[in-house]
Image (tube, coloured by chain):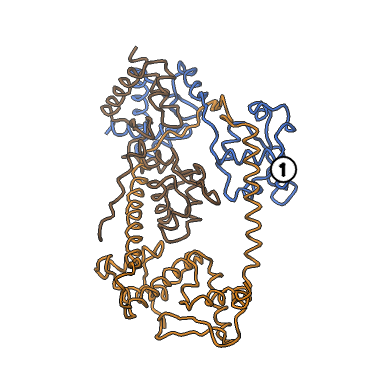
Chain colours: A blue, B brown, C orange
Amino acid sequence: MQEELKACIEALLFAAPEPLSEKALAELTGASPKEVEAALRELLGEYQERMGGFLLYPLAGGWQLRTREEFAELIEKLHRPVNTTGLSPAALETLAIIAYKQPVTRAVMERIRGVRVDSALQSLLERGLVEEVGRLDEPGRPILYGTTTKFLVHLGLNSLDDLPPLPEEEVL
Amino acid sequence: MQEELKACIEALLFAAPEPLSEKALAELTGASPKEVEAALRELLGEYQERMGGFLLYPLAGGWQLRTREEFAELIEKLHRPVNTTGLSPAALETLAIIAYKQPVTRAVMERIRGVRVDSALQSLLERGLVEEVGRLDEPGRPILYGTTTKFLVHLGLNSLDDLPPLPEEEVL
Amino acid sequence: MTYQVQLPVYQGPFELLLDLIKREEVSIWDIPIARITDQYLEYLSVVKVLDLHLAADFLVMAATLIQLKARSLLPRPKSDAEEPAEPDPREELALRLLDYRRFYLASLRLGELLVEAGRRFPREAPCPKLQVHYTRPVGSATPELLCRLAADVLAAYRERQEVKELRRISIDLPGRMRAVLSSLAKEPKQFADLLVYGRSRLDYVVTLLAVLELARKGKVKVRQDRPFGVIELSLGSGDEPDARRTEGLH
């Protein structure tokens, strides 16, 4: 029973986006606060003993599983992947529209491309190639997007004026 | 050394938002692919033996820590939006066609299903299960769609080769 | 007085057809077209398909079935041994049904996988300092590539706008009437031949209206031997159609 409760608590702590209080754990598992406390104490000891990748920390009135401090640099590397993958065709098209029609709203991008641009735009924002540059003075005040300095740097451009000109008829 | 590598790998798997490939683990830890493989095998065994709240699963060509299936209902209590994977039958049919015939155009999907697929396709795109993967070199340059890594993760597959085989064209 | 009937919901015409065939316990290669068509139409008459697009797709299949049924009821013309046999439309339908069925079955399995895998949860705690650094955020893209893409996308956009304009113009009755006449001037046709698969419902409606108007004016003769039978169209004895006159000029 105690082993089962420990596994339940571990699963909850593992999946929870925030620290869980003992009260919350008791409610979720249906165990008594005493049982939860005992299970937590055993888990704490086990994690200390096995010295794996993570430990159990008291945080904000609750408990949270976190990686051991020693691995901080290692995990930072994880979030700084040597990511050389190019942009998807959808993201590239969206970037081209933003580059030539900025400042531009998402609605305009979608009208021009004929499809949703959510994930394409998301990936451009994550890469820091485009950013919000303001809002359109219209109902709903839609966000306007434009390219960043990083965009210029990575394309080897000095300024936006250095973008190759569009063929005449496409200058809408 | 082996224990230290295991702890490193556990920390990385614990912190990573997505499945990590053995190659990525080797690069991040500086260990050899052989060492990583051995460490992973030991970790797999340990998790199986201790039967805690989570296990190690092969997913989308990598490895990810996930809670044990037995705790699904418990964790659903924790996550307020209970079920976000409920795809409509129409979306599922469309997803099946994309999964097995990728890269594939919308016209082919509509020909097979005998109905328009606009809204089904839209919902798959919004969920990030499929994406544009290019364009067909034909008049109109129709968009080609394929499945994403997220698709593999959400179906618990390691690679597209693990898809259940498409039923044969047998007589009814 | 109305009866409340629980009707199954179908994702499309193929699913409905497969269900009817299964209930009749017949081979997909030997579909009793007349019976299945009646049942298909009966289902459509009872169920209200709210989604207009879906309704249109069901109706297109209905038209195909009616055509097949008419063909199956008519005596077969004596086949000339010299002539190559034309593809059996029933066989084509069976092949499409079988193809659809494979993906239908696969979709059920994928649904199961989704549910199974959804029972295993990944960690969702946000990682501190989660900041992805892309060493080459644009990949190998160049300004020239972006320029070409922008030009292509904008050109495609402009074309779509133009197509929209064209469509509005193309739905003019006189134009469709001329098209029907010029098509019939070559040879008599069945009404179904005038309907191009994949066109919009509006397009079908315009064609129907054009035929009715031409029939009223006596420019087109319409014959149907039995209810739901093939509708035969030929040029009427009325005015000489424009199409012929222009053809004569060439």
Residue corresponding to mark 1: A135
Q: Is residue B39 left or right of residue C210?
A: left
Please indicate whether residue B127 sits to the left or right of residue A112 in the image.
left
Q: Position of residue C106 (x, y in %)?
A: 33, 51
Write the residue at 42% across / 68% down: C61
**As drawn, C177 above or below B109:** below
Residue C171 is situated, as x and y percent measured from the top left of the image, at 62, 70
Name the outermost residue toward the top: B1
Q: Residue C140, position in %: x, y?
A: 57, 29
Residue sitting nearer the eye, A132 or B75: A132
- Residue toward you, C164 or A69: C164
Inspect this view and state whether residue A55 appears: no
Q: Nearer the viewer, residue C35 or C114?
A: C35
Residue B41: name its quadrant.
top left
Dot 1 crowding, Cα within 10 Å, few <14, some 14–19, many 20+: some
Return the chain for callout 1.
A
At a point 45% along the width and 70% down the height, the residue shown is C59
Question: Residue C155: percent from the left, percent from the top?
Answer: 65, 48
Where, quadrant-wise, is the N terminus of chain B in this rendering?
A: top left
Count of all numbered marks drawn on residues in the image: 1
Q: Amino acid at mark 1?
A: Arg
Helix, strand or loop at mark 1: strand
Q: Quadrant of the C terminus of chain B?
A: bottom left
- Image-based side of A36 in relation to A62, left or right: left
Q: Is residue B96 above or below residue C225?
A: above
- Report the residue at 60% width, 41% height from top: A93
Residue A157: quarter of image: top right
